Every structure is written in C-alpha cells, then in structure tokens.
Image: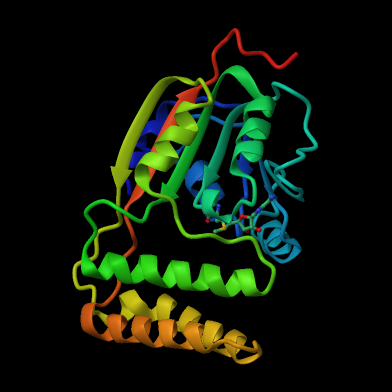
Amino acid sequence: MKDVFDILSKIKAPQVLDAATGRGDFINILKQRLGHFVRIVGVDSNPKTVEHAQNLFPEDEVEIYQMNLEELNFVDDHFDLVTISNALHHLANVELVLAELLRVLKPGGHLLISEMYQDGVQTDAQRTHIMMHHWVARVDQRFGIDHFETFERQQIIDKIKSLGLTDLKIKDYYVPVNNPKDAQNCENLKRNYNGILKRIDSLEDSQSLVVEGEEIQKRIQDYGCAPASRIMILGTKPLNQSTD
Ligand SMILES: C[S@@+](CC[C@H](N)C(=O)[O-])C[C@H]1O[C@@H](n2cnc3c(N)ncnc32)[C@H](O)[C@@H]1O
C-alpha cells in the first residue's frame, strides 16, 4: 500500500479533485502523500457521506460538496489532479463519469484511478472479500442504489486506455494480511455482514440473498478475509486535449 502511492510524492498539484470521495478515506492518503497541493475538493452524491467528510475535514484546504459525477459543477480544464478510488463499480455510467473527470482535468494534469478487481490470482481469503462485495452490491441494487460487481482487471485497463491519456503507469497492489482468520481482520466484514442481514430482512423474496449470505459466513470461518487485489493507474491528459 505504501509503495504504490509513493508516486504521489512526485506530483505537485495545486488543485485536486477526489471524485466519489465517500467518507473521505482517499483524501487522507492525498493529504499525507502528495508532493504539493493547495486545495483538495471531494465530491460525492450521497448526502450522508458528504456530511461525514465535511466534519472530518474542517480545514480550509479541503472542501467537500454533494455533486453528481455525471454532471460536475466545475469549469473545463480546472484541476491539476483528479482521483477516483474504489468507486468505478459504484457508477451507473462509468464512461460518462470518466469523460466528465477528463473534462475538468487540465491538459498536462494527472488522472489517478485505484480500483479493486475480481479476477487474477487472489487468495481464498481475498475471494471472501470479493464475494462479500458482490453480495452487498446485489442487496444495494434491491434498494435502488447503484452498486455493481467489481470489474475484471483488464476491463479497468481498457476503460482507462480508451481515454487517450499519455505516460500510463499501471501497478497492482494489495494490503498484506498475516493471518486472514484473525478475528480483527474480519471484524469490519462481520459488522457489515450483520448490517446487511438486517437490511435483507425487510425485503420480500430474499431467499437467494440469504443463502448467498450464509455461504459467505461459512467462508469467513473457513478461510478468513483479506482485501482483494487492486490496480492503480496514473495517466496524463495530453497538452493538445484541451476541452475549450
Ligand atoms: C466505495 S465509495 C468510495 C470510497 C472512497 N473513494 C474511498 O476510497 O474510500 C463509492 C462512492 O461512490 C459514490 N457515487 C456513486 N455514484 C456516484 C455519482 N454518480 N456521483 C457521485 N458519487 C457517486 C457513492 O455515493 C459512494 O460514496
């Protein structure tokens, strides 16, 4: 985790946009690791996470807004760095959002994507995490929330390559876990699991989701859990690609 974001220390980006900022976890990484910044703007469509992030970052240099990534309220060519972490599989229209992120990025500015993927070599404990993720996505969908299965690694690469960025840097990474069955590793997953079961309770025709949940609980016991592998892609918007 440390090494893959070392690349941020070489980036001097006065104006930064963290898209789909959620509770602001990636803003913390940006604050700690960026070589230089003046202002970090985080945007998300969920009013609850926006409120959480606004409380988390009271400082002037971080601003959090509720906004739809499909229609960003920023002028063209504005940001020096645009980031989107763990959110591509939450988007109803990935292509439209990526085009918007590119629109607000300055020519010569950087786009950074970090995203977990579902294929490749993953341990049994990592597969528990992926299965859990897909289960939560199916439950969210039943409540009308955009959340989809995670992408395959190559699908993510293809989406980003189609943007025409230059100097693409692609790195795979994962958070190492010594003992996947260690109760602490699974604590978050178990907490989420219990919350999801409660949500399923209120649904009609939820038998298949309950069965899927039971399989995941058995996996947590048998294999434990560890975060799935992720890909980090960094690219530069070509100087001749101004949106003006
Ligand atoms: C898993 S969270 C992001 C986590 C965060 N970036 C991080 O790395 O910790 C995914 C976020 O995408 C947001 N989202 C999904 N579709 C969106 C859209 N069209 N516009 C803005 N935010 C969106 C959701 O509200 C959710 O907070």
On screen, residue 144 above or below 209: above
Q: At 56% from the left edge and 48% from the top edge, which residue is drawn?
A: 27
From the viewer's side, name the closer residue of 20 and 184: 20
Dividing the picture into quarters, in which one does residue 141 lie? bottom right
On screen, residue 11 above or below 86: above
Q: Quadrant of ligand 1?
A: bottom right
Give percent across and percent down for residue 225: 30, 72
Give percent across and percent down for residue 103: 68, 26
Q: Is residue 142 left or right of residue 156?
A: right
Q: Is residue 126 left or right of residue 60?
A: left
Q: Is residue 124 left or right of residue 103?
A: left
On screen, residue 64 above or below 165: below
From the viewer's side, name the closer residue of 129 and 234: 129
From the viewer's side, name the closer residue of 161 and 37: 161
Quarter of the picture containing the C terminus is top right
Give percent across and percent down for residue 211: 43, 87
Give percent across and percent down for residue 140: 60, 71
